[in-house]
Amino acid sequence: MAKKEIIEHYTSLCRMCDNRCGINVYVENGRIIDITGLREHKWNHGRICVKGRLGVDQVNAPDRILKPLKRVGSRWEEIDLEQAYDEIAVKIKKLQATWGKRAMSIWKGEALGFLTQEELARRFTHAIGSPNYFSNDSQCYVGRWIGYALVTGNWATQDFINTRCAVIWGSNPPYSQPNLTQAILGAKEKGAKIIVIDIRLSAIARQADEFVQILPGTDGALALGIARQLIEDDNISHKFISGYTHGFEEYAEYVAAFTPDRVEKETGIPADTVVHIAREIGNRRPKISIYAGNGLEHHENGINNIRAIACLDGLLGNLDELGGNFIAEKPDLRSLTLYREKPLRHLQPIGADRFPVLYDFRKECHTMTGMDTILTGKPYPLKGMILSGGNPALTNPNSRKVVKALKALELFVVRELFMTETAKLADYVLPAASYLEHSELHFHPIHQIIGISRQIVTFENCDYDYIFYKKLAARMGVEKYFPWKDSEELTRWMLQDTGITIDDLLAHPEGLEYKPRRYQKYKDNDLLSTPSGKFEFVSDYLKNYGYSYLPEYIPPTYITRPNPEYPYVLSTGARKVFYTHGRNRNFKCCKTAIPNPDIEIHPIDAKNLGVSTGDIVTVTSTVGSVDIPVKVVHSSHILPGVTQITHGWKESNVNLVTHDDRNDPIDGFPLLKSVEIKIKPKVDTSDI
Amino acid sequence: MRIIIIGNSAAGLGGLEAFRETDRDSSVTVITRESKQPYSRVLLPYYLRKKVPYENLFIRDKTYYSRLNAKCVTGEVLQLQPEQQTILLEDGSKLSYDRLLIATGSSPVTPPIPGLSGNDIFHLWSLQDAADLMVHFQKGKDVVILGSGFVSLQGAWAALSRGLNVSIIELMDRIMPSALDESTAGILTDQIRKSGINLRLGTVTEQVEQTDNGKLLLHFRDGNSLITDFIIVGTGVQPNISFIRGCGINIDAGIVVDRQMRSNLPGIYAAGDVAQVPSALGGDPVIHALWPTAVETGRIAGSCMAGEKVSYQGSLNMNVTRMFNTTVASMGKFIAAENRECWTDKSLPEDQSLKIMLEEDVPVGAVCIGSSDLVSTLGMLRPLIRGKVSLRGKPEMLKAILAKNIAQYHRAFGKEY
Amino acid sequence: MRFITMDVTKCVVCRNCEYACSFRQAGDFDRDHSNIRVEYYDDVKICLPQTCMHCDNAWCLEICPAAAIIRNETTGAIEIISERCVGCEMCILACPFGNIHFDKINLVSRKCNLCEGEPNCVSFCISGALQYIEAENSYKNNRIIFQRFIDKLSQNNNK
């Protein structure tokens, strides 16, 4: 790129995944032509992944939706944007007048923005008098957040850079959080041990000092076994336990049963490995960073498994330590939500009765219950939804039901960049603005830095989130909640209490430190944010709801009640390098490299099934079936009997076989990672 | 010091360049009987195929000799007079040397077939040959190629690509005996025939006859005959050593040299196709009339003439070429023999093949046909052949062994080692 | 001179470098177009990124019969001039690292050219395995160092 000097250059932050790496964006004649890593940024140090570069493809994609569309019968008609807003507002008002305010809902996806987007969606929902804010978060991220928050009051951030032992548990950062890899392997270079616990030999597992291959859903047993060993070896922080924890005695008594032999039986991990890794971890106290990944939260006992892992922090004393699990402080941003001004819990947010913990902690409605509500009208009618940048038709469990439900809505508005499987079900599809078309605040907790992403280009008709909500609010008579002219004014308001200005942020593309890092903050006046103010090995809060007091281990159903008809276990959702959930499948270059979905199976299973790579099989659960090509992986990659399918492919949508009604009882997360299935080679009838 | 280098192809150029890396001052004279501006014989078939333009045949620019502070003269060397340390040129002039590099290369041979001379009968060896052939490379013309070595097949491919009707006549019952084993040659034979070439194996040409209408008629021993517009003779080469016979220099098949490319006579070095050099695999000295060996031996000679203490590891024969939409390559001992295990890569499709020959677990050679990735594998195998690295009975682990070795190398890279 | 170093203890074979290189060469994520190749060897558990070492006295450069391989005096990169390359594949056979590959569409050899001194693969390496650093000594000796490893391997394996 020798011609960069005649090209406009902007610094911003990437939103092709959650990492939010610093980027340079190059614009020529109003068109974004290149994105590169921003050298100065503290998170990514000039490196980005190809997914980040795909931002160029996304913003310029020929198949982008650039005109508002309205469904007329079975076809789409282009409609003037303001006209569309008028019509939608009228329909929402009518719908709310007929069925009640709470019959309308908002769903936030991940494809467009970040924190501000989420808060705006929450704000708008309450502004129009509905408690029903939905998002992808009722089946992603929040399970771990709650699991940790129940124990420590927070979900700490891993200080991998300074750690002596990184435990990557059920996560594959090179694909899911690319630039975290730099930090982890940087620590390895400085002598840290890398321990990877996973059902698959993931990318990060290739560089692990210890790769521990575990049976799906049995992680709690391993965590409790490690705890038992740490206690037996007296490899624990007595100071932390005696000073800052709650329920250690009961917890210690409970974990005593998880001997290495028992753990081997539960998890498939050799007993001496359990002892060994407990010592590898314990001997590096307190500089131990444990990251619990997405792999842990899609199980029927997910929250308790995560609690069991979180409890290790109490033994190791690594909480809020340099090189440990660091409790980052947040910037003092003003919140956009209206939970104080307009608390609407009495209106029965959907799922809040069934999964009160989910609502208590995150004010999230439960999307899976939402689908049932739409279809049954119980406990009350849910008739309308505005969904921004999400694709539940592919990414929520039991897709057939999702499609049926979304089709049944009286008003379904989708704001999108592309005609997704979900957008296809809408009454109105409105062009959305990508992350390069609006400005938003971001922060990186580990460095306690704040930054701003920039509006670099604009497209006609593509309103960004704030403008969308503001325009609609005006038509709904609730404009008082959206008084700011544009995102700049909004951002200025949000920053008001921080002493930081937009200009400060623009002057610091590398990220502006909003507070210096402090450690062991629980020792001072700010206790842990748990009910007891202490680290909770046991939870009275959960007990009061009738849930497990201890981080109880309940083995997965496929082990306790194996169903001979469905002999294989399916895990879903392993990431691919440049796909983020259902996104990026429409880019040609991605198709070249990874053209189709597949089911990963062990060579022994392939032999038993008589299939080889490329053969099509039918995968069936009690929910449904999907046809998919086989990929026979190396015998070390996956355990015999265990299989994996990545989600987000419309060609073979794995969520046709996943359960929306088998949930973790505490947070309502669906069972996505140990689904009982059968596999049948698809008979090619053309040969017969 | 006065240096004379006879020849300005791979060995001569390698010699000059390596010499100048150490010695900038001594006078150097290069004698050539062809173009002063060095060109590459290897490229001639590509030129005929029109893959490269004429000017790209030249592999050093016009300022080359002046940049290297060397003089280049055109002439044929008639005689070498070692006692006087002089050489006698055709024009009667005499040149004195302190050190002499004989890099005169080789010339194609013509088999003793009656009628195989005169109009429309060519070799594909020199720049002049290529220029002559270019006139005949016209769509629809018939060409017969005698012989099926590398150059012949390259010529055949070029002719085919240009739309000529091509026949290849091979004396033996298989092609490329010096570069491929039988089964690999078989795969290539299929490719050649599939491409539309009339390939006749085991065919002895008894006579060539000029017909009245200006064509050539080949008579074969089996009674068949073939009419053609022109013939390319590609039946091997021999070293250009006639001018030194009888001067006391030790000649076997070529000039016998040691690991410093020194002949038995003081100050006289030889490299390239004329030199019979130590083999990388031990045994008798060999002539490998191959471009890489010429470059290597030329450079060794040049360095030694300049006083450097380097020693040739020995020539490892290696061949590679892409033609008929596939690639063939071989090196070392690539033919199965007693006491030699042949490992075959069974994962390859039918039209591809990779074989590695092992003697007591140590790879000694390999041969492949198919994708270029196989050539790459041969390239990585080469250090193991040269280094006599045992594969410990696990040739299927070759890639892993190579990976492990290169990984260790990377670990040390950037650090003092 | 600056070099791309490849840390085999950091590479996770995510292939970001391959895709980035291929994208730069051909506007697509096609491994065949990439001048860096990454492989995970299950049997020996090795992650191996491989791209040109830009050897001193590069053998590919020395033996190219078309004089199509040169050293870029600015970046130090060993480069293939594709207009001169005839596609004989001699360089592919010559490279002991397997770092040259064949472009099946244009019928020429391809290899890393250090992207005019700003290698794309390094910018897209999210593990930090690839670095673009000054490494003068290694560059001077890399053929010799490699030979030492061969010798060591020979000693070890032939015991």
Image (spheres, grey):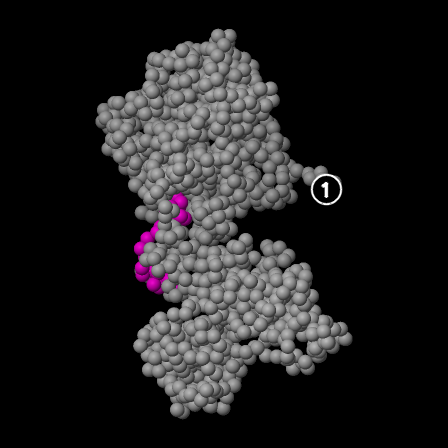
The residue nearer to you, when weighing A267 against C140, is C140
Question: In the shown orientation, is residue A155 left or right of residue A597?
Answer: left
The image shows residue B150 at horizontal and vertical percentages of: 58, 69
Q: Residue at x 56, y 73 (%)?
A: B129
User: From this viewpoint, which residue is outermost toward the right?
Assistant: B223
Local secondary structure at mark 1: helix
Q: Residue at x 55, y 22 (%)?
A: A77
Q: Categorize mark 1 by other alpha carbons within 10 Å: few (<14), some (14-19), many (20+).
A: few
The relative height of residue A479 versus residue A159 in the rendered view (above or below) is above
The amino acid at mark 1 is Asp
Q: Within the image, what quadrant is residue A488 found in?
A: top left
Residue C139 is covered by the magenta coloring: yes
The relative height of residue B228 versus residue A96 in the rendered view (above or below) is below
Residue B224 is covered by the magenta coloring: no
The image shows residue B411 at horizontal and vertical percentages of: 37, 55
The image shows residue A386 at horizontal and vertical percentages of: 47, 20
Number of marks in picture: 1
Question: In the shown orientation, is residue B70 left or right of residue B111?
Answer: left
Residue at which label 1 appears: A687
The image shows residue C11 at horizontal and vertical percentages of: 41, 48
Q: Residue at x 38, y 70 (%)?
A: B63
- Residue at mark 1: chain: A
Q: Which residue is drawn at 63% across and 58% down?
A: B351
The relative height of residue A200 versus residue B56 in the rendered view (above or below) is above
What is the magenta range?
C120-143
The residue nearer to you, when weighing A593 against A557, is A593
> Is residue A266 shown to the viewer in this render?
no
Q: Within the image, what quadrant is residue A608 found in?
A: top right
The residue nearer to you, when weighing B412 against A431, is A431
The residue nearer to you, when weighing A156 against B64, is B64
User: From this viewpoint, which residue is outermost toward the top?
Assistant: A97
